[in-house]
Image (cartoon, coloured by chain):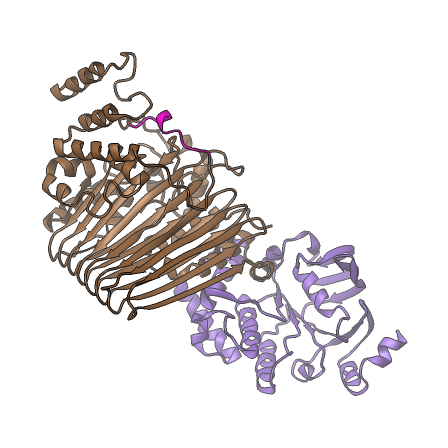
Chain colours: A brown, B purple
Amino acid sequence: MSASIESLVNKEYAYGFVSDIDADTIPKGLNEDVVRLISAKKNEPAWLLEWRLKAYRRWTTMTEPHWANITYTPVDYQNLRYYSAPKSVKPLQSLDEVDPELLKVYGKLGISLNEQKRMSGVAVDAIFDSVSVGTTMKEELSKHGVIFCSFTEAVHNHPELVQRFLGSVVPYSDNFFAALNSAVFSDGSFCYVPKGVKCPIELSTYFRINAAETGQFERTLIVADEGASVSYLEGCTAPKRDENQLHAAVVEIIALDDANVKYSTVQNWYAGDKEGVGGIYNFVTKRGKAMTNAKISWTQVETGSAITWKYPSVILQGDNSTGEFYSVAVVNNKQQADTGTKMIHIGKNTKSTIISKGISAGQGQNSYRGQVKVLPKAENARNYTQCDSMLVGNKCGAHTFPYIEVGNNTATLEHEASTSKIGEDQIFYCKARGLSAENAISLIVSGFCKEVFKELPMEFALEAQQLLGITLEGSVG
Amino acid sequence: MLKIENLHANVGDKEILKGISLTVNAGEVHAIMGPNGSGKSTLAQVIAGHPGYEVTSGSVIYEGADLLALQPEERAQHGIFLAFQYPVEIPGVTNAYFLRSAYNEIRKARGEEEVDPMDFLDLMEQKIKLVEMDEAMLHRSVNAGFSGGEKKRNEILQMAVLAPKLAILDETDSGLDIDALRIVAHGVNQLKRPDNATIVVTHYQRLLNYIVPDFVHVLAAGRIVKSGGKELALELEAKGYDWITEAA
């Protein structure tokens, strides 16, 4: 046993934990000692522990927000476990051991057999393509000076970068969930693209191959230095289960002068059963800051989770900066989503685009909530918002909450909204051409979402489209 | 090919078809005529399997099997094609993509291999000439913003690509100017083969100047009240429907 682990074990004991507890988990509940313990287990520097503690102390003074258009059983924060070391799962021997339902979904998504194995935890041969591809990518990235690693690694290997940017866009005091995340975050990803470098690889591709184990409180920090650019994709179309019901992630993006960051998400966490039992509560804070001439673009496809509370936003700090938000949110059965964006125009000639497509089926409730704020000094700000809702069936709901605050009369804002119902006549038309109901819905819905799908990295666009079809399966006739 | 016997069908509680019997053989063109509200379109929709109609009695045998037991998509996969009176818009889905999806799904159902986008585009380019449509239409959303005539031509394009055994044209002539009518009719005639059949549902005789039927049936109040050859259509044009419907 290494010295550091030994000291940890002793520390645990010193804090009075009963000795029969597995060394890699800690008791339920949250207090300063738990925060210290998490930090110690990760062997973090003092400044980070200090930051976590400040966040924790602030969190204790905050109350859970209830303005969103969602209802759920209250979370008992003292009944959660805030740290467990990544478990080593015994690999399965073949796909025969994997849940056939899961394989069916993989098949429908068109995921290759090798990838199916990897995603379902089947042991793969060491010469399996992705391993070598992964290594090649890592070499390629480091050749260009791009840092792409786990958050924990970044804290140890690039503390100056983490310290400089952590909390600079989403301060720990930002909101209840962000404060909680700041206090107890487990791990996440860190990406830094140096000055003038165009990241040579779509980091989405990388992610497909090294699907990082995402924790309950994930923390991501992406920095594109001056003139740099990067495209990043998190998540996966394959369904993902997690025993932890509460997820509170934070993602911060910093695009310095002339930088360009494109961040895409496909979220397909467990949504609960048809009656709404189980399912992930997904309370996420995502925000980017764009400096002069910089551009930040969010694209999200949200199909999973029982509850989604998420507003990827852009602070348009620098002159001529651009913010974009493209979103598809689907709710079926008893899922609820309250999602949208905030575009804060601070610099001159700043420009933002919001395209939101909400699809509600079953008894799902889907809300778009968006804020466009133009500060007094933001001369010539421009925003275009398009917000479309589609209803499938009679028991679902679509809601729109746009907030517009304009403090400068040179601003130009456009807002378009529409609500449509997927018609029996459309479905019959498709069927009369030989398409199954399932394919018909998938086709109609993907047509509805076209403007968003075209923003996704190529290889994901088709999968996302299939995913929509699967999510809406059984919602019509 | 198709044998309809004593077919009754309802919308809600209202009986629309009140005992239709009709036999269509390969190679034949049948025209179904009749005044508004006689049940012409209902017959077309029932054959295609529209869920809004309930068959209360009677049978429809297609190629020796019970057609009514099949889902609409299965009917299409077995070679039945309905050219809609009111083609439906599907925003965001291109014509080419829609047709390729349909084409491949039908091929898949028949155990044939799917066709890749490039080969399919070649097929489309060849078929689109038949209806004198601009190729740009292939890349526009299905029927969205199409004029009435464009929608109808698009239906015939779909028919040309899917090459059905039994095509039903539901008032394809309504709302067409004379040029469009000629183009649509030309398309249909080009697609005629000895092993397929066409049912033309129409209110007016004028389409039948271009698509010459082997048989004409007059539908009134849910029944076929008169059948005859192509000359019956001309007679109807001259005398109207009253003399038949009253006699019936």
In this orientation, does residue A232 appear?
Answer: no
Q: Which percent across, then down, holds residue B22?
A: 77, 66
- x 28%, y 71%: residue: A410
Q: Which secondary structure dominates the residues rendered in magenta?
A: loop
Looking at the picture, tell me which residue is in the foreground, A366 or B223. Answer: A366
Quarter of the N terminus of chain A within the rendering: top left
Q: Is residue A389 left or right of residue B236?
A: left
Question: What x and y, as percent, mark residue A7?
Answer: 15, 18
Give above or below for B226 relative to A326: below
Furthest residue toward top: A19
Q: How many marks?
A: 0
Q: Position of residue A362 (x, y in %)?
A: 54, 46
Along the line of sight, the residue nearer the viewer: A401 or A187: A401
Q: Is residue B62 left or right of residue B77?
A: right
| Magenta stretch holds residue A349 | no
The stretch drawn in magenta includes residue A77 = yes
Instruction: Let me know if residue A449 appears in the view.
Output: yes
Q: Which residues are magenta?
A: A73-82
User: Does residue A470 lie above or below B85 as drawn?
Assistant: above
User: Which quadrant of the structure image shows residue B121?
Assistant: bottom left
In the displayed structure, would residue A361 be above or below residue B63? above
Determine the residue positioned at 33% across, 43% down: A284
For this rendering, which residue is in front, A472 or A72?
Answer: A72
* Relative height, residue A175 to residue B199 (above, below): above
